[in-house]
Image (tube, helix red, strand yellow):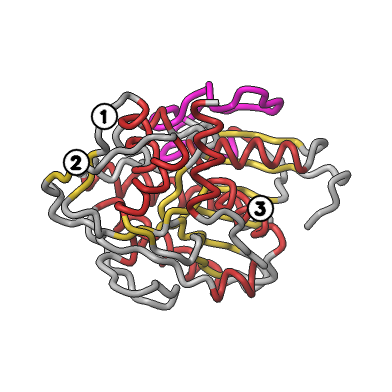
Amino acid sequence: MPSADSKLNLLVTGGAGFIGSNLTLALQEKFPDARLTVIDDFRSGNFKNLAGYRGDFVAQNLASLDWHAQFGEQKFNAVFHLASITDTTNHDQFEQVHDNVESFRRVLSFARPTRTRIVYASSASTYGAATTASVETNGAAPANAYSFSKATMDNIARRAAGESPDWIIIGLRYFNVYGPREAHKGLPASMVYHLAQQMKAGQRPRIFKHGEQKRDFVYVKDAVEGSIRALDAKKSGIYNLGTGQARSFNELVDVLNKCLGTNFQPDYIDNPHVHYQNFTQANLTNARSALKYEPRFPLEDGVRDYMQWLFG
């Protein structure tokens, strides 16, 4: 990783969003002298997520941004590309795929001449209906337009990296991320957030029958740490970022009860979603070797830290 005192020039797209804002503020803390620029169009971000941010901000839609007009000959050490339409319930296939894929294409064409390192957000949703831990070599099986757009980005990234071995492009398949600065997302915010709000309001947590669905819930601090470690990766690749553990919704309710000092039984409801990932779990073998990634927050610790942040 570049030393903290070297003048780094870093850019984060989607930096007002959930993971993006956590990453931006972590970069600012880790590299206090770095020059930081955030690009966001506030479709799924909020300026309040960037309280204390000291860098530049460009309010632009990435699907139509002319990078050269905006940045001229400016050179970046790395671009973290996290911007996308993250609402998986947005079923407008054209909008979802066009905006996510074309934005990425523009990032790549700007970075190509200078071989600027790209770290971009892929997604665990590309694995589709899994029943065992997902390995990066598993084929994509997208069940919605969002996942399809991410799988397409992975294809484009692999091709670009293959054509230019001296250009490092890292894709990060974030699993089920939860934590501070996600509230603005509304419905697409994590299960952890929604259930905590229900329980804090004195309501039974509503989960799908019968709570046996399992998720690899990864705390945003781990997702950010893995993302920053991608600055050191020696070669291109696509890596899972999760905890490596699948935990059931019933277990999550237990953990929340302990953290909140409550004793609620789940309120089981029918699952209205046709394409629903009933199981997600990251195989972390490749992330451990290539990124030296080691998650520090099992569900109990992540939820405790988060509840402290949410409710003090």
The alpha-carbon separation of the residues under discs 2 and 3 comes to 39 Å
- Neighbour tally class for label 3: few under 14, some 14-19, many 20 plus, Cα within 10 Å: many
**Residue annotated with mark 3:** 228
Q: In this rendered view, identify the residue nearer to me: 144 or 155.
A: 144
- Mark number, residue 170: none
Q: Which mark sits nearer the N-terminus, 2 or 3?
A: 3
Assign the C terminus to one quadrant of the image.
top right
- To which quarter of the image does residue 261 belong? top left
**Residue annotated with mark 2:** 267
Amino acid bearing label 2: Asp
Check if mark 1's residue and mark 2's residue have beta carbons within 8 Å. yes
Amino acid bearing label 3: Ile
**Residue annotated with mark 1:** 203
Q: Which mark sits nearer the N-terminus, 1 or 3?
A: 1
Q: Is residue 23 above or below residue 300?
A: above
Residue sitting at x 43%, y 75%:
135
Specify the principal SS of the magenta part. Answer: loop
Q: In this rendered view, identify the residue nearer to me: 293 or 74.
A: 293
| 118 to the left or right of 145 | right
Check if mark 1's residue and mark 3's residue have beta carbons within 8 Å. no
Give the x, y percent position of residue 274.
Answer: 13, 54
Q: In this rendered view, identify the residue nearer to me: 130 or 54.
A: 130
Residue 186 falls within the magenta-colored stretch? no
